[in-house]
Image (cartoon, grey):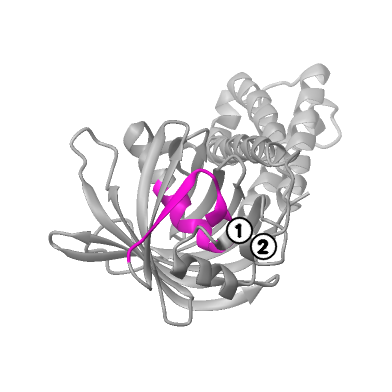
Amino acid sequence: MQYLFSTLLFLHGVIHLLGFIKAFNLVNIQQLSAPISKGAGLIWLLVFVLFVVSGITFLTKHQWWSILAFLAIILSTFLTILAWKDAKFASIPNLIILLVAAFSLSQVVFNQKISNEISQLIGQSGGFETPKVTTEQLAGLPSPVAKWLKVSGVVGKEKIHSVWLSQKAKMKMKPGQENWNSATAEQYITVQKPAFVWKVKLNMSPFIKITGRDKFVDGKGEMQIKIFSLVNIVNEKGVKMDEGTLQRYLGEIVWFPSAALSPFITWEEIDSRWAKATMDYKGTKGSGTFHFNEKGDFIQYSTLRYKGNEPDALRCEWVIDVKEHAVINGVGIPVKMTATWKLDEGDWTWLKLQIEDIKYNLN
């Protein structure tokens, strides 16, 4: 598809070269019956150059190729109107190129927005002390939580203040969906000021691409999902989103276990394998229950979470189950997990997630 579209750009550009050739009488071009002045011929030449360069930058994946294409389309449309009798069919490739360029530019703008959010997020993670986790700091924790922190290997290491991770996932968008949609994602997380930005690219079909971004900053949650990075299909915020996103953050501390010592999280022991955590940050509050096995590994997280952001949305049980653990960068974490909604009509497992890589304490 990439080479097919770049060929269209090149061929469409070459066609505009004919106008330049006719204007300067370099070759007799019978396909263009209307006279073309030398001034107009130079514009035809410019459009040729713009389309060819945009084709090259498209192939080399330069993100601003679409700007060149937009300029070429504007000039090409002007020339097409002037020579409508001979050039009217040029409006068809112009329209195709315009649509692709619009999708591409919207992706650049959306990605830049996310990059700015990530830069702000990581910028707020600096300036804090990162002392090592000590055994004494575990004294006030429920016994299964203290055991988990020891087993995970964070004792004796610096507290984690920021995280980057990459993920592969399979997702279902609604109950009853048979086939899984593949996705890739990356996430940036901070601890001293609890926050995250999560960016996902989801393949709905060979021709439909969805880009999504979840974030939790200053106690506020927000979800935005766009088709082709252009059209919003989800754009949600509000108190229910705030609570649900905080509950997600709370459940994900298992990837950066020293965050269990955060002053914004309080723990309550249920028994030797269960503990309840409550997180309260900037007016947003939520709880979840953590389950550990006999060895001390985390194996499940459950919480009552709003399923949706509508006024009549209700809390449903949301469960994370661990399928596999691994040690990455010296820390034992779950690397394969599933997420399930416990609904009245039955369980709906909508996510299969795998951690591909993780880095701590970013510069």
Q: Can you identify the residue that label 2 sits on?
A: 134
Q: CA distance from mark 1 to mark 2?
A: 5 Å
Secondary structure, mark 1, is helix
Q: Residue at x 60, y 69 (%)?
A: 356
Q: Is residue 234 visible?
A: no
- Local crowd at mark 2 within 10 Å, few (<14), some, or many (≥20)? some
Q: Is residue 107 magenta?
A: no
Q: Position of residue 357 (x, y in %)?
A: 64, 66
Q: Residue at x 63, y 65 (%)?
A: 135
Looking at the rendered structure, the kind of residue marked 2 is Thr
- Between 191 and 237, the one nearer to me in the picture: 191
Q: Is residue 267 magenta?
A: yes
Q: Residue at x 69, y 72 (%)?
A: 330
Placement of 319 over or under 147, stated as above or below? above
Placement of 153 over or under 97, stated as above or below? below
Looking at the rendered structure, the kind of residue marked 1 is Gln
- Local crowd at mark 1 within 10 Å, few (<14), some, or many (≥20)? few
Q: How many marks?
A: 2
Secondary structure, mark 2, is loop
Q: Position of residue 277 (x, y in %)?
A: 40, 54
Q: Can you identify the residue that label 1 sits on?
A: 137
> On the picture, is 74 further left or further right than 202?
right
